[in-house]
Image: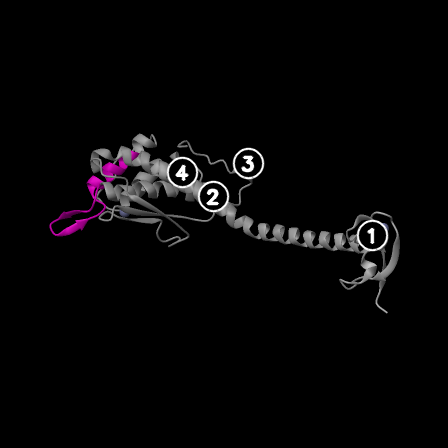
């Protein structure tokens, strides 16, 4: 015989034992005296079944909640990195606007180049590049940023923007990319934005080596940190004066 439970009439409390799932037309489902009195079918209820159902529902809800929490935890680092990336992009764009303004005497009011922020690309080889004809630059930013790498981002930003402000100059058939004009523009930014005194006294030829001559005189002037996802939430406030 199937398992029997107690079914009770909610009106008169009269009850009896019946299977857990009586047929729809099983009279034991209904309290006939109360039905006759009210003129409508009065259903009996099975308190033990109700309790079981509540328990099952609670377990299912708990499982669903645990799953939601599990998924949220999994997505958390990604979300955190996204937040950090957005913050960095904001900082870099804002700073680019300032630098570009300082380069105005060279680009004569050309619109701000498009800035692509790439992560972990060409690591250790190249920190960025510029396409002056497309008026676009790329700045590479690591997932985590040390102080020196953060500093490098600002230096690279200025350097690449400078390529758009002072495009390559053709002299005697050769393209002079890191020209004398280029470095005079870049020096203006270092001096005016970052308050460095840059001397070109040690420059013998105009070329990429001039970057090192500039950095040697100014390396520790920029200490704005880019935020990283590994930071604690309260340590996320970037050390940067361009907000
Ligand atoms: Zn009844
Ligand atoms: Zn360059």
The answer to which of 157 and 70 lies nearer the viewer is 70
Q: Magenta segment: does it hold 74?
A: no
Assess whether mark 2 and mark 3 are in contact (beta carbons under 8 angstroms). Answer: no
Residue 185 appears at what percent x and percent y?
A: 24, 37
Q: Secondary structure at mark 2?
A: helix
* Disc 2: CA contacts within 10 A as few (<14), some (14-19) or many (>=20): many
Q: Secondary structure at mark 3?
A: helix
First of labels 4, 2 by sequence position: 2
First of labels 3, 4 by sequence position: 4
First of labels 3, 2 by sequence position: 2
Estimate the spatial distance between the alpha carbons at disc 4 and disc 1, rounded to whole Å.
Answer: 78 Å
User: Label 3 CB, ligand 2: below 8 Å?
Assistant: no
Estimate the spatial distance between the alpha carbons at disc 4 and disc 2, rounded to whole Å.
Answer: 11 Å
Residue that numbered label 2 is attached to: 84
Residue that numbered label 1 is attached to: 36
Estimate the spatial distance between the alpha carbons at disc 3 and disc 2, rounded to whole Å.
Answer: 13 Å
Q: How many marks?
A: 4
Residue 124 appears at what percent x and percent y?
A: 39, 52
The answer to which of 34 and 7 lies nearer the viewer is 34
First of labels 3, 1 by sequence position: 1
Residue 238 visible in rendering? yes
Region of the chain picked out in magenta, as a range: 166-189
Residue that numbered label 4 is attached to: 91
Estimate the spatial distance between the alpha carbons at disc 3 and disc 4, rounded to whole Å.
Answer: 18 Å
Residue 177 appears at what percent x and percent y?
A: 22, 47
Residue displayed at 55% across by 39% down: 233
First of labels 2, 1 by sequence position: 1
Q: Magenta segment: does it hold 182?
A: yes
The quarter of the picture where the C terminus appears is: top left
Residue 131 appears at what percent x and percent y?
A: 26, 49
Assess whether mark 1 and mark 4 are in contact (beta carbons under 8 angstroms). Answer: no
Q: Which dot marks residue 234?
A: 3
């Amino acid at each position: 015989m199937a398992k029997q439970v107690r079914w009770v009439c909610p009106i008169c409390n009269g009850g009896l034992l019946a299977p857990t799932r009586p047929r729809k037309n099983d009279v034991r489902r209904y309290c006939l005296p109360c039905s006759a009195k009210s003129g409508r079918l009065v259903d009996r209820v099975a308190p033990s079944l109700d309790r079981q159902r509540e328990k099952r529902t609670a377990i299912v809800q708990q499982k669903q909640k645990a799953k939601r929490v599990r998924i949220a935890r999994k997505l958390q680092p990604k979300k955190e990195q996204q937040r950090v990336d957005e913050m960095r992009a904001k900082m870099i764009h804002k700073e680019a606007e300032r630098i570009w303004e300082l380069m105005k005497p060279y680009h004569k009011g050309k619109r701000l180049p498009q800035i692509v922020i790439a992560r972990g690309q060409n690591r250790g080889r190249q920190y960025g590049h510029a396409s002056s004809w497309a008026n676009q630059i790329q700045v590479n930013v690591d997932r985590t940023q040390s102080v020196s790498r953060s500093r490098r981002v600002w230096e690279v930003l200025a350097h690449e923007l400078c390529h758009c402000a002072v495009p390559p100059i053709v002299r005697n058939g050769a393209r002079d990319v890191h020209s004398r004009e280029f470095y005079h523009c870049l020096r203006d930014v270092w001096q005016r934005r970052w308050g460095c005194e840059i001397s070109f006294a040690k420059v013998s030829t105009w070329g990429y080596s001039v970057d090192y001559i500039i950095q040697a005189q100014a390396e520790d002037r920029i200490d704005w940190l880019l935020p990283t996802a590994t930071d604690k939430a309260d340590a996320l406030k970037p050390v940067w004066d361009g907000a």
